[in-house]
Amino acid sequence: MSTLHVDSIMKRYGNNQVLSDVFMSCSTGGIIGLLGRNGSGKSTLLKIIFGALHTDNKFVKVDDDIINATKDTVGRIAYLPQDNFLPNHIKIKTLIVLLCETESIQFIKDHQLISPFLNRYVKALSGGERRILEVFLIIFSRAKFILIDEPFNGIAPIYKDEIKDLIRRQTKHKGFIITDHDYSNVLDLASKVVLLHNGSTRPIKNIKELEQFGYLP
Ligand SMILES: Nc1ncnc2c1ncn2[C@@H]1O[C@H](COP(=O)(O)OP(=O)(O)OP(=O)(O)O)[C@@H](O)[C@H]1O
């Protein structure tokens, strides 16, 4: 078993102290559902864990290895941002080979949600098709810990269950931190739920607590 350990993360934009007291721990086999209101700092936190955003205060460790920069994340942490990140002019079958773990490449190419697009370029996909491809590339990437920002955004309800099943299967050897405003899907997947509230992470035991913290009405 491997563990991603996140502690002592602080981040301020000008006078806006977005993160002040963050603690999270995710082991392979687990899925952390990260919830929080708009602007609570979820994307900021994922970017800092991955190393895509700088802050002076952070402690991120995978097993015994301290993660300081994006180069330290190779094979350890992968990150799906909210926004498109794929290059437009590469064929989809090439991206799969470049980015995914060897043992899953054939499975992905044969999958009904991906196989129709193998010979297309990313620029020829619709927004939802592109998001499905991005989710596949990240959850089957070579990293042990996968950070996913809004995987279900723009994806039709019928495909969400399939994506959740794929994520669950990957927990055999990976750990996930997932945030999405489609909170019912996050709760459905998560083995632990964490709420970002006033800059702090708070472990959540039940729906009632989400109401008490003002996340749910
Ligand atoms: N580059 C930046 N400069 C200044 N402020 C920023 C910057 N990026 C984010 N912020 C602010 O930091 C806070 C946290 O933003 P962040 O995007 O992390 O929130 P979030 O929880 O992911 O929000 P959402 O759920 O709406 O996507 C917000 O108040 C936002 O306005």
Image: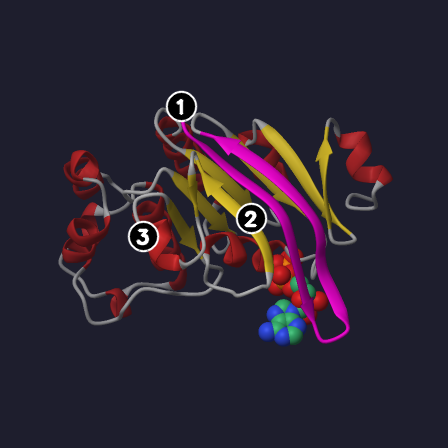
- Which quadrant of the view contains residue 68? bottom left
Q: To which residue does mark 1 refer?
A: 1
Mark drawn on residue 59: 2
Image coordinates of residue 213 in percent, x first then y, are: 83, 42
Q: Callout 1: helix, strand or loop?
A: loop
Amino acid found under the numbered disc labelled 1:
Met
Determine contact: label 3, label 2, CB under 8 Å: no
Looking at the rendering, the stretch of residues picked out in magenta corresponds to 1-27
Query: Would residue 96 appear left or right of 81 to someone viewing this image?
Result: left
Q: In which quarter of the image is ligand 1?
A: bottom right
Disc 1, disc 2: CB below 8 Å? no
User: In the picture, which quadrant includes the C terminus?
Assistant: top right
Residue 165 vs 101, above or below: the answer is above
Q: Looking at the image, which is closer to me, 117 or 201?
A: 201
Residue ID at (48%, 56%): 154
Pair 3/2: label in front: 2
- Check disc 1: other Cα within 10 Å, few if <14, some if 14-19, many if 20+: few
Q: What element carries label 2?
A: strand
**Please, what is the dominant secondary structure of the magenta stretch?**
strand
Residue found at the very far bottom of the displayed protein: 14
45 vs 90: above or below: above
Q: Sequence-wise, which precedes: disc 3 or disc 2?
A: 2
Lateral position of residue 22 relative to residue 197, left or right: left
Quarter assignment of residue 120:
bottom left
Confirm whether the magenta stretch covers residue 17.
yes
Q: What residue type is labelled 3?
A: Leu
**x, y percent for residue 158:** 44, 40
Q: How far apart are marks 3 and 2 (CA)?
A: 31 Å
Marks 3 and 1 sit apart, C-alpha to C-alpha, by: 28 Å
Label 3 sits on a secondary structure element that is helix
Residue position for label 3: 133
Relative placement, left or right, of 132 versus 47 is left
